[in-house]
Amino acid sequence: MALFKAEKKAPKGPAGRWDVLVAEDMCKACGFCLQVCPVDVFAWRSTANKLGWLPMIVAHEENCVGCMLCYQICPDFCIAVTVKAGLEEGAAR
Amino acid sequence: MSEPAARLIAPWTEWERRHTKGRRLLEAGTFALTEGAIAAGCRVFAGYPITPATDIAEYMSKRLPQVGGYYMQAEDELAGMHMCAGASLGGLKAMTATSGPGYTLMHDAYGWAITNEIPLVVVDAMRVGPISGITGAPGQGEFYIARYASHGGNFETIVLSPSSVQEAFWLTIDAFNLAERFGTPVTILTDQVVSDMWEDLFIPDDYTELDFVVPRKANLTMPFFPVGSDAIDVPPNIIGRGTGVCVSAYTHTEEGYDIEEMEAQWAQTHRLINKIRHHRSELTRYETVGTDDADVVAVAYGADARTVKTAVLEARARGLRAGFVRPITLWPFLDELFAADRHYVVCELNYDGQLVREVMRAAPDSRKVHFMGKSAELHTVSEVVAALEGVAQTGRIPELPYIWTEVR
Amino acid sequence: MNPLAKKYLRPSQIPTKACHGCGIGMIENWLLQAIDELGLKQEDVVFGTGIGCVGRQTFATWGGDNFGATHGRALAVATGVKLAQPERRILVVVGDGDAASIGTSHLIHAARRNLGVTVICEDNMGYESTGGQFSPTTPAGYVTNSSPYGMVEPSFDPCDVVKAAGATFVAETTATQWHQTVKVVKKALQNEGFSFVHVRFPCNENFGAYALGTRDTLKNLEWIYEHTQGRKADGSATDFTWETGIKHDASNSRPEFTRLLRDMNARVQADLAKKTAAKA
């Protein structure tokens, strides 16, 4: 049993109700969020950030199902995942 | 010969004159040190029992609950000193008391308190070394260690030494005041004799009436560490009031977090050293007898000064122009007491020579500074008289049993 | 950025000095969640730490009052702070060096006294700040910077030590147990006495390099995950498994240390008042 699943699949639950933000200048490119995300929200940026790392960016925010794994696993306080404005948390699930 | 002029420069001469309502007791130095601390507002003692300072711990365990304070018997001296630092950071005046073996263990915490400008009082009741040495005899082997009470350099320290039970009472209050004003730990160097001997002691009845006690204030705003400034009377920082202060072991910024830059080290050191050096006049305490016209001056501090002073008076009575210098402030060292070009006989309770080296450095002619080292017993009046007369007549201390005269 | 970081941390100190993929930041995120869920404000909590990776990388990140003690002595300083500021929650975040090696004496006595602090021992199983030497929690036989032939010293679990010393709350989690850690830290903070939470986390740069043969952040976190679950990705057993969970919960079952002192003071002063009144 692995922590980071190689195969991504769409879990049950509506996508597209979440705002995902990455503070790109705080990212140290550990890769955890990219690997733990089950629905491919993240991708690598091709240009370096202020710290000298190639950081993570939010590539497909519309895929996000609000599982919060990325938020929990980021070691550098970069990630914020919040319900899109105008939606209640219950409605988004 | 006329009566030799006697001088005592210390703030408590005035305190004693103004505060005369109290009681007279026959008590030990440890009792006086404890009551002095309580009178100064000390409300935390954290330490580990060690001869000859143990009685302070016992008295504190009794007295502190009576005044709403806390006695902590720490698991070791290292913990004790850190607990005192934490308590002082939390807003309570704190003190610890130990002897040489425990003082050595406190150096990590001492440096932490210095760098973070935490007011503390540390009593080191010295005994004979090295290490446990002779537990029941007076020594003066931590003269330099008290100046260099932590590693790394880039700091000054304040060290005081009383020579009587009464003086121990007032001097402890003075030590707390200096700790508050200078934002630093202050070491009180005593010894087994001053700690354990019983003498006449006057204690004021009402400690709340002691208007000369510097109260604990709290700094609630930036800068937490005014690096680059040499100001004293800066209120200490406080943890637990949500000011956001950072207190650490590293070279720090004004906010207190670590910064690894030469400019920051310069600014921090400028403060730690100059706040003491630039205010030496606030730190001058000493006693002299007959120095106005002396040809040969005996130098001693602490309990040893008692017999040495008697010897000077005896030598005077025998026709010798002898003088006596007792530094009460040991650090910053009072160079000015040794500015006159004459012979100095430095009596101290160690054989390796510590105080004598500072006198050699400060005096105009180090060849006229003579070392009279002794260990495990106070200097006797007769041997000091013999030394003074020997120096006056031949320029050398004569051969005396168990007296060390070599300094290398 | 993480909204709790905005709420509780010091902006000038993040991003932290931690290496990429280091577990310290993850755990700090979970600590903030626990603090936030308990409704605690920045001024309610005093953050204390020590030396080493866990010390250096967390110190000053907290926006409120914080102290970084000398190595191993965070609990001794915390004892003094608690005496003077008993109303504050004191969160002591230290590494395996600070807690299980140089500072174990203070850990034992703080637990014995039931001092009202919460200790988070973040364990990367070695002295990683100085390059990766072994520590008392390095698994037996592992190769480190100072055990090139394999660690010969037996290791121990600091949880056992504090439990024996009298801690009233003891728990263990790892860096792949985010929800459990938040829950456990909340419980720990709600114990008025001594709480100890032991969280094992990965170090890619040193432990990973020397003991596991890789600095790959994903592989290092997988290693933690495997040893938490007791099974590798291919289903085979791991060489050892960490026992996680709440190991001892006697929260609030005996008085907190400084409360004992304050109660004694009240008794002593009442007695004194009676004696003085009788004399008058």
Image (cartoon, coloured by chain):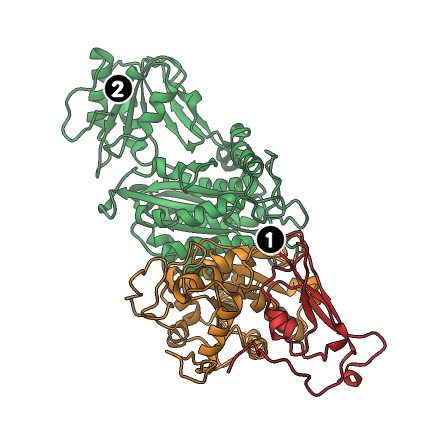
B188 sits to left or right of B131:
right
C42, above or below B115, in the image: below
At a point 34% along the width and 50% down the height, the residue shown is B102
Which chain is the one coloured orange? C
Q: Residue furthest right?
A: A86
Quadrant location, the N terminus of chain B? top left
**Residues flagged by tags 1 and 2 on a common chain:** yes
Which residue is disc 1 drawn over?
B238
The spot of residue A43 in percent (x, y) is: 68, 67
At a point 44% along the width and 46% down the height, the residue shown is B110
Q: Nearer the viewer, residue B87 or C60?
A: C60
Which residue is disc 2 drawn over?
B315
Q: Amino acid at mark 1?
A: Ile
Within-10-Å neighbours for mark 2: few <14, some 14–19, many 20+? many
Colour in which the image shows chain A: red
The spot of residue B250 in percent (x, y) is: 51, 47
Q: Chain of mark 2?
A: B
The spot of residue A83 in percent (x, y) is: 78, 76
The spot of residue A55 in percent (x, y) is: 65, 60
Return the mark for residue C112: none
At a point 45% along the width and 85% down the height, the residue shown is C235
Q: Chain of mark 1?
A: B
Within-10-Å neighbours for mark 1: few <14, some 14–19, many 20+? many
Q: Amino acid at mark 2?
A: Ala
Residue C87 appears anywhere in the view: no
Which chain is the one coloured green? B
At a point 59% along the width and 52% down the height, the residue shown is B246
Residue contact between numbered discs 1 and 2, judged by CB atoms under 8 Å = no
N-terminal of the pair, mark 1 or mark 2, is: 1
